[in-house]
Amino acid sequence: MSPVHQFHQDDVLVLTIDNPPVNALSPGVPEGLHAGLDVAEQDDRIWAVVIIGAGRTFVAGADIRTFDLPPEQSPDLRGVIDRLDSFGLLTVAAIHGAALGGGLELALACTFRVAVPGAQLGLPEVRLGVLPGAGGTQRLPRVVGVQKALEMMLSGNSVGAEEAETLGLIDDLIDGDLLTGAMSFARANVGNPPLPRVSKQKVKGGSPELFAAARAGLGKTHKGQYSPDLIVDLVELATHKPFAEGYAAEKKKFMQALASPQSRGLRRLFFAERAVGKVPGLSKDTPLTEINTVGIIGAGTMGGGIAMNFLNVGIPVTIVETTQEALDRGLGIIRTNYEGTVRKGRLSQAEMDRRLSLLTPTLSLDALSGADLVIEAVFEAMAVKREIFARLDAIAKPGAILASNTSTLDVNEIARSTRRPESVIGLHFFSPANVMKLLEIVRGAATSDTVLATCLSLARRINKVGVVVGVCDGFVGNRMVGRYGDEARKLAEEGAAPEQIDAAMHDLGLPMGPFEMSDMAGLDVGYLIRQHQARVAGAPKPGGWLDRLVEEGRKGQKTGGGIYDYPAGRTPVPSPHTAALLDTYRHEQAVSPRTIDADEITRRLIASLVGEGAQILDEGIALRSGDIDVIYVYGYGFPAYRGGPMGYADEVGLASVVADLERFGSVPAPLLKRLADEGKTFGEWDKERGRG
């Protein structure tokens, strides 16, 4: 059955694209549109064609799954767009929901475009490392002008129907039923030849200075990416070359971008993010707990940030502290954060006041007795957490979810402090919790399916990317960053300066290197983790150079000095004190410092991440390599266009990663070694297990 349905009413043929869930332009859709246009041409009664989407949207873009198909198997979107561009009858694109990517390109090839209020129109291809490939780079500047077209295509942001009407991107806003309005619009404009064609219009605006400024800005907004430069080139081409020439160049450059490692990385992440909610064995029909009220224990940086996530979506929060001073300080931070957003124009004062009205501060843990979900966000000490959960067990109502924001500790041990371990889960938010998109959802041995499914659903509700992980020291993110940090520390001990190590990660595309990240988080955090691990293992107290910095009171940004000095706030400056301490430590350890180049730094740090990630996969702590990539992009700033650390390893080759680990004295995880020997990738490993 064709995904494009036909029916006609008097002189108008309606073609309805019905390809759920988002009417993507999959194989069959262009063919269905061609068939409908054939009918219109052959039926003398038909004077106009309306193209509309079924369900909740018009067309949300191309089917990304077809991007890697050979040309003869790919949907021929360009073919149907070419036909619409020269079609002899009036055509109207009737837009509701979203007209994105190929959907907007399809609409731009029609004679007219109408939309309902609230519809969204855009060309977001840059977010997948490609560019509009069916005329978008040539048609959009002819309609909205060069500057707006560049803004839309380089940001990937859409515009609402109201703005689109102002820009001339749509010809009429339809109040009431879209189809009825679109047919009326078509009939009102039949018989007014010549039919307008976007491809025949002149490009609006554009100057050498505008294009130079656009290219200059790409280094900041799209560092390391390939397709944004091509987009600027194509729009500039549109200003001085015929449409046909620009259209042909667009096709060629689209294929170049599609073949780039940046596009492969971004597409990998696109699919990985959509797979994280699929947990083997967890039924879609699992009953959920209704979350209408949330309790948070701890009003510090993390607790306050966590509270804001729920306030932002209208969920009342009760926040508990042990002293009035700590409570007031925490409330002040929340208010300050909101006030900053108001000053930037991103939030109204009335909305800020509404959100704060949902917050109830208290010094009484008993006030959490009615909460549907309680999140503990206190000091990272097992004894403290066990005590709190034992008290919660007696206070919280039956069916309440009890969650810990622990970043490293054993959720199973915390759960054993209660008589309801099935209700206990880890919800590891990342700092700043009101900003970072990642949420590690730590499934304990006894965590029920209902609790897990509820937390996955809740993550989406509060606009987080929730990734399910297993219980181990540090879970996925911090366990891997611990190994990464260890390798960075070794590099410094062997002779590399901290700023040299961080610079190598900047060059790879990370916003911060390992030492800048440690200073921001607080060196005392890692110090306490190392102390805890040593106690558990019965090992001597750690005494490395980082531990010495902490014991001297240098804990990072918050104390004005850590690995770096911070004479002007948060800007790191190489520290003579740290350099001297490192020299002393090397001398004590009988290490002769050597020159280490950026290539070795990069290879060692990435190999350490990937090696630990492979071990985590082998142990089942992460469900799939794509989950690890999502964690590292959204939690640690790994560049999305590199596909995350595991995707990057697939790109450079697992055999190369194994060689780096062995060269620098590490034993590769068995899974990594096996995949490298078999010439396979982590992506293939995911697919073999039905998790890709």
Image (tube, helix red, strand yellow):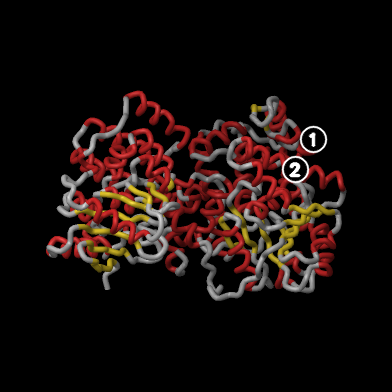
Residue at 40% from the left image edge and 41% from the top image edge = 152
- Does residue 107 appear anywhere in the picture? yes
Residue for badge 1: 553
Q: Residue at x 65, y 49 (%)?
A: 433
Does residue 170 lie above or below 61 as drawn?
A: above
Left or right? Give the position of 486 relative to 91: right
Considering the numbered disc 2 on the image, is that residue within a helix, a strand or a loop?
helix
Identify the mark nearer the N-term, 1 or 2: 2
Residue at x 24%, y 45% (from the top left corner) = 251
The picture places residue 368, in percent across and down from the top left corner, at 79, 62
Few, some or many residues within 10 Å of mark 1 (<14, 14–19, 20+): some
- Disc 2 crowd, CA 10 A, few/some/many (<14, 14-19, 20+): many
Report which quarter residue 126 is drawn in: top left
The amino acid at mark 1 is: Gly
Question: Which quarter shows the C terminus?
Answer: bottom left
Q: Is disc 1 placed on a helix, strand or loop?
A: loop
Left or right of 538, for residue 583: left
Label ID, residue 264: none
In terms of depth relative to the viewer, which is nearer, 312 or 166?
166
Identify the residue under disc 2. Answer: 524
Q: Pick the quarter of the image with the N terminus.
A: bottom left
The three-letter amino acid code for the residue at tag 2 is Asp
Q: Are marks 1 and 2 in contact (CB under 8 Å)?
A: no
Where residue 144 sits: x, y (%)? 34, 38
Instruction: Provide residue 572's location: percent of width, then percent of height.
Output: 64, 30
Picture quarter containing residue 364? bottom right
**Residue 55 coordinates in the image, percent (x, y):** 40, 65
**Rendered residue at 87%/49% (across/down):** 323
